[in-house]
Amino acid sequence: MGNDVEGRKETALHLLSKLAPAHGAPGSESQVRRIFREEVPGDVRTDGTGSIISMKQGTSDTPRIMLTAHMDEVGFAVQAVTKRGMLKLTPLGGWWNHTLPGSRVRILTGSGAEIIGVIGAKPVHFLTEAERDKVMKLDDMFVDVGASDSDDVRDRFGIHPGDPVVPESPFTRMHNPDFLLCKAFDNRVGMALTIQILQMLDGRKHPNTVFGVGTVQEELGMRGAQTAVFSVNPDAAIVFEGSPADDLPGTVEDEWQGAVGRGVQIRIMDPSAIMNRKFTRYAIETAEKHGITHQMAVRKAGATDARPIQLHAAGVPTIVLGVPSRYVHTHNGIIHLGDYTSALELAVRLVAGLDRATVEGFTAFDD
């Protein structure tokens, strides 16, 4: 894998084009784990919940640096099958139901087959005036896979209650090739960053020991991070996220903190976590020193794996680096390749500087 700018972009596109389309609803992250194992050299292990961990030994056993992202994406599970062969869904993560009718989905069966279906929508011709102005409840929706009845769903399609469901959305470079379109950039973009950094560290010296981690079930309450941080027991952590972009029509430009194309987002706080102030300042100063395009964010909503990680043991200095993504938690998101490479460069610079004295300074509360 090349270390030059174009080589890093090629690697990023390779990883994103594999990771983003992969099936990975919460609790069913096996395809993403498989890609992690294919792409990461060296020993890889999993914990009891399915989070995946790879260690890169540096010139010192400590500090132990955790680079982490969640493998899962918002999705659904098959809740029931009607007599007529339609699937009923239960959500795995947060959805705005308005975005769902008429969209394609992929059901992953127990045999590993993937079945295409569509979330049924009543034609506009059949809607009452009241229905046209109302957002449908998920309980009133169904998935049509082209089956004749429930026996057909079970016996010919191999679909059963509990099978995971994700959007169907191919990875696409848009007319401006720096803009990338696909599902699940929350958080396959973070997984791509974690994997690419591990690849870059292979055979390189760094003043610490790095643990690259992919967690499970973040979309259901940061569950995998709780066990993964116990397994790693880090001295500091960097959480990578596909953060919601806010540069949309109807928003106040003066308040944009996650604009697509304006660089890596350094998150200062959100309702779930106030990041370590010294570590955050160190990240900002590193970005400024090396001319890395960045934007700072104080989020009014949302949460990340930083919450359970920073509360581990006696406390772990933690920061969140985000790649802004438009339309997260829908079938199609958009990211900018330049934001990804900014996040990559900043993270690599941070890892190179996180020696024992620097990390110990993050928790020197001597004021």
Image (cartoon, rainbow, N blue to C red):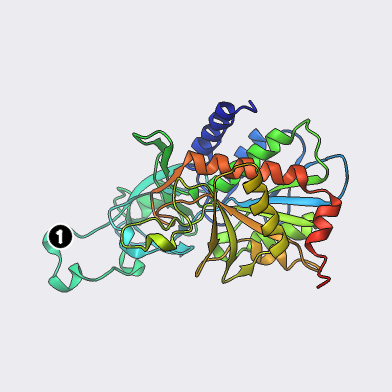
Q: In front: 307, or 257?
A: 257
Q: Secondary structure at mark 1?
A: helix
Residue 59 is drawn in which quadrant? top right
Which quarter of the figure has residue 261?
top left
- Determine the residue positioned at 46% across, 42% down: 336
Residue lying at 44% horizontally and 64% vertically, measured from the top left = 90
Residue toward you, 367 or 251: 367
Q: Is residue 29 above or below residue 101?
A: above
Quadrant placement of the C terminus? bottom right
Q: Tell me if 162 is positioned left or right of 254 in this view.
A: right
Drawn side of residue 234 relative to residue 303, left or right: right
Res. 282 visible in picture: yes
Q: Which quarter of the image is occupied by the N terminus?
A: top right
Number of residue marks:
1
Give the vertical position of 216 relative to 183 (above or below): below
Q: Amino acid at mark 1?
A: Val
Label 1 environment density (alpha carbons within 10 Å; few <14, some 14–19, many ≥20): few
Judging depth in this view, the residue of 345 and 237 nearest the camera is 345
Q: Position of residue 308 (x, y in %)?
A: 68, 66
Query: Which residue is under mark 1?
Result: 124
Image coordinates of residue 6 in percent, x first then y, are 55, 27
Q: Is residue 80 visible?
A: no
Considering every residue shown, the one lying at the far left of the view is 125
Q: Position of residue 115 (x, y in %)?
A: 40, 44
Q: Residue at x 73, y 68 (%)?
A: 311
**Can you give x and y, in whole percent of width and height, for residue 365 in the image?**
81, 70
Residue in front for this viewpoint, 234 or 286: 286
Question: In the rendered image of this protein, does residue 153 appear above or below residue 58?
Answer: below
